Image: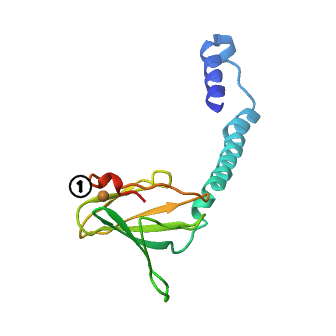
Amino acid sequence: MILTLVMVLALIALRATPAEKQYRPGRWFILGGGVLFPVVILTALLIYGFEIDYPLFRGESEPMNIEVTGHQWWWEVRYPGGGGAEVVTANEIHIPVGRTVRINVRSADVIHSFWVPRLGGKQDAIPGHENSLDLHADQPGAFRGQCAEFCGAQHAHMAF
Ligand SMILES: [Cu+2]
């Protein structure tokens, strides 16, 4: 909208006759269009931007960690217990809604790829190396995951 306004004013200026070009707007035009207008618009955009960004900053200090290890052909899931017993599941990951969960991905044999399409991108599970990725579920539900790296004969069954 502002671009259109500027373009229209530029066109008017370009098409002006020499007599019209002698016109000098008052000080109000310079102060209004050159100072007041940008300050008001940029302040409004700044506030709007903070509104959008705020959820990103509201920050959970420490994300919940879940250790996931790829095996031929299943996923081992460990929930490190803070002082309590460690919980281990296979091919099933339970995460809280509305909280960022850090998935630490490893492999016990070949390269796999951890992927829950509706919650985030892919992360490779590489033998001897740990990768991590953050998942965030905004709504409760069941989200299918799949190994996204061909890892052997039963690769297609490596879902979670
Ligand atoms: Cu796999």
Q: Is mark 1 within 8 Å of ligand 1?
A: yes
Please state which amino acid type lies under the numbered disc 1.
Gly
Image location of residue 53, percent across then percent down: 60, 56
- Left or right of residue 104, residue 94 in this image: right
Q: Nearer the viewer, residue 88 or 51?
A: 88
Q: Quadrant of ligand 1?
A: bottom left
Image location of residue 9, percent across then percent down: 65, 23
Q: Nearer the viewer, residue 67 or 24?
A: 67
Q: Residues within 10 Å of mark 1 (few under 14, many from 20)?
A: few
Task: Name above or below for residue 85 compared with residue 43.
Answer: below
Task: Name above or below for residue 3 compared with residue 66.
Answer: above
Q: Nearer the viewer, residue 36 or 134?
A: 134
| Residue at image mark 1 | 152
The answer to which image quadrant residue 17 occupies is top right
Image location of residue 157, percent across then percent down: 35, 55
- Left or right of residue 111, residue 63 in this image: right
Q: Residue at x 65, y 21 (%)?
A: 8
Q: Secondary structure at mark 1?
A: loop
Image location of residue 38, percent across then percent down: 66, 42
- Left or right of residue 40, residue 141 in this image: left
Q: Is residue 148 visible?
A: no
